[in-house]
Amino acid sequence: MSQANQAGGRPVISATGLFTPPEAISNEELVASFNEFVRRHNDAHAAAIAAGEAAALAESSVDFIEKASGIRSRHVMAKAPVLDPEIMAPRWPQRSNDELSIMAEIGVAAAREALARAGRDAGDVDAVLCAASNMERAYPAMGIEIQQALGIDGFAFDMNVACSSATFGIQTAADYICAGNARSVLVVSPEITSGHLNWRDRDSHFIFGDVATAVLVEDASMAPPDHWVILGTRLKTVFSNNIRNNFGFLNRAYPDEAGGADKLFVQEGRKVFKEVVPMVAQMIVDEAERLGIDPAGLRRLWLHQANAGMNRLIAHKVLGHEASDDESPTVLDTYGNTSSAGSIIAFHLHHDDLAPGDIGLICSFGAGYSAGTVFVRKAG
Ligand code: COA
């Protein structure tokens, strides 16, 4: 291990990694299952609905989902139970304390890819930040389990800033490197969002998907030649109840019990759209100005992947014109919203073609509200 380089360093992104669950659910499969649930629910409550004592549930539609969100499919860790109208939640066998936890397992897979791409030995890594919007348990930290599974001799912890967890993690890692407290830090974002999504809620049942990403943030002096220089990071939070999940150990009702619906993801989607777009666009432009970067000259925006319309508007405000797929690539269509992992997946899949000197932006936004910008320049 190389921890505690008191001289301080210059943070770069050495490599990224991605784990994609093999199973995926198309909109057609999702809507067929949801509508079967609606039919069964309405049949079971037919008398109350006819008497005006209960409202009938409305069906979902593939057309609406694609038009409102840009999502066509999403990967999940457990397809069958999510699609089963009697369950509509992920399920897998409970693992013993001696087995690797499911979040740690997919985080380790993404981390191993990042390490391999960087040509990095886990023994050279100083710290692991598990940065994600939901943790599988209270403690011990998921990060420490990932650290141990990778054989890293250093420190680890968990951090949760919802959809902005990864960018907040990158800034934290970069700060450690600047301060000389670490030289190599893994920011791992295992996002099993299928567990916090209410698959019975028509307004949001289509939004999320499961994935894990990893970002290896290192001191430039040890990074591989084709790294990305971190030009600057900026974080912002503004409290809002418009995206909320009340699940927690002080809340007694569980999601499938009466009164438990708010222990899953809930949002006021329209308000989120209206409030977050201007906040994030302004933040990007301000931060570009602080760094002396012309926003219109940004080669690529790797934006948070929540909604295609939001990304279109933000990219337009930043670039000053309608962004092409090349300027603002989407992974929403195949991954859905993967919370904090979204902008990292976009970066991971769409950066190889950029030239040395090109400048781009990794940007997250979501619950909190929270937003993070990471401006990067391809080295060389
Ligand atoms: N199938 C068919 N119709 C649906 C539907 C579904 N699954 N869900 C909602 N509708 C209907 C509504 O009933 C409403 O009908 P009405 O006009 O007759 O009342 C209409 O579609 C519009 O609903 P609304 O919820 O206002 O949709 P929207 O256009 O705002 O799109 C979101 C919904 C969630 C996709 C959009 O608001 C969004 O993406 N917001 C930001 C989300 C976000 O980034 N969240 C962060 C999470 S990290």
Image: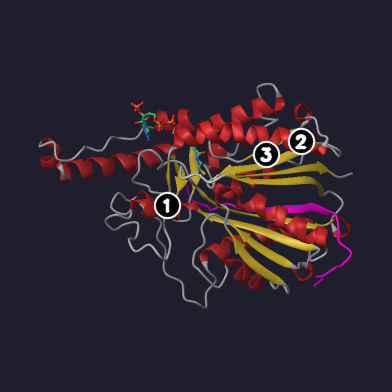
Q: Quadrant of ligand 1?
A: top left
Give the spatial CA distance, label 2 vs label 1.
42 Å
Tell me what residue is drawn at x 62 percent, y 66 percent.
Answer: 143
Front tag of 2 and 1 = 2
Position in image of residue 342 (x %, y %): 60, 45
**Residue with the mark numbered 3:** 302
What is the magenta range? Answer: 1-24
Q: Quadrant of the C terminus?
A: top right
Is any part of residue 71 visible from this angle?
no
User: Which kind of residue does numbered mark 1 sit on?
Assistant: Lys
Whether 21 is among the magenta residues is: yes
Tags 2 and 1 touching, CB below 8 Å: no
The disc, 1 or 3, on the residue closer to the chain's N-terminal end is 1
The secondary element bearing badge 3 is classed as strand
Name the mark nearer the viewer: 1 or 3: 3
Total numbered labels placed on residues in the image: 3
Residue at the spot of label 2: 288
Residue 222 position, x and y percent, is 86, 60
Q: Secondary structure at mark 2?
A: helix
What numbered label is drawn on residue 79?
1
Which one is in front in this view, the residue at disc 2 or the one at disc 3?
Answer: 2
Name the residue: 55% across, 71% down.
100
- Is there a contact, CB below 8 Å, between mark 1 and mark 3? no
Of all residues shown, which one is farthest toward the bottom? 98
- The amino acid beneath tag 3 is Trp
Alpha carbon distance from label 2 to label 3: 15 Å
Along the line of sight, the residue nearer the viewer: 232 or 198? 232
